[in-house]
Amino acid sequence: MAKGTLTSFSCDLTQNNFTVTTQYIVGQSGEQITAVDGQGNWKRSNVYAAGVPLATYDANGLHFNLSDALGDPLRVCWQKIRRLHCQE
């Protein structure tokens, strides 16, 4: 799967000048596992358990997706250089 830009609306890739800006590697259930830019450089990877996103790893470090017992998001926390940061 990919995201990109077009110069004209056409399904013919030789005519629409489609340029990939982000490519996605997806899991068996369609969840986004890894994203790379148009040149194939890694951007981020995600970790899932039973279809629920647990964490994202990117250039800024490891981000944990925390939720309450009902599944509502509480905050996003990330770890960088042995310190844990959280934002509401």
Image (tube, rainbow, N blue to C red):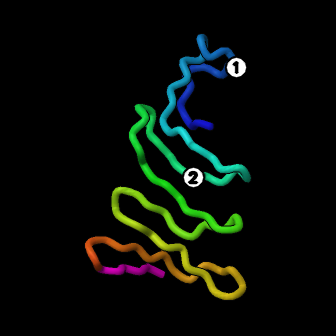
* Residue at the (58%, 36%) spot, across then down: 2
* Residue at the (40%, 57%) spot, across then down: 58
Three-letter code, disc 1: Cys
Up/down of 37 relative to 16, above or below: below
Q: Which mark is residue 11?
A: 1
Q: Is residue 27 magenta?
A: no
* Residue at the (71%, 50%) spot, across then down: 28
Question: In front here: 6 or 13?
Answer: 13
- What residue would you read off at disc 2? 33
Q: Which mark is residue 66?
A: none
Q: Residues within 10 Å of mark 1 (few under 14, many from 20)?
A: few
Q: Residues within 10 Å of mark 2 (few under 14, many from 20)?
A: some
Question: In front here: 27 or 6?
Answer: 27
Horizontal and vertical percent for residue 47? Answer: 55, 62
Horizontal and vertical percent for residue 24? Answer: 56, 43
Q: CA distance from mark 1 to mark 2?
A: 27 Å
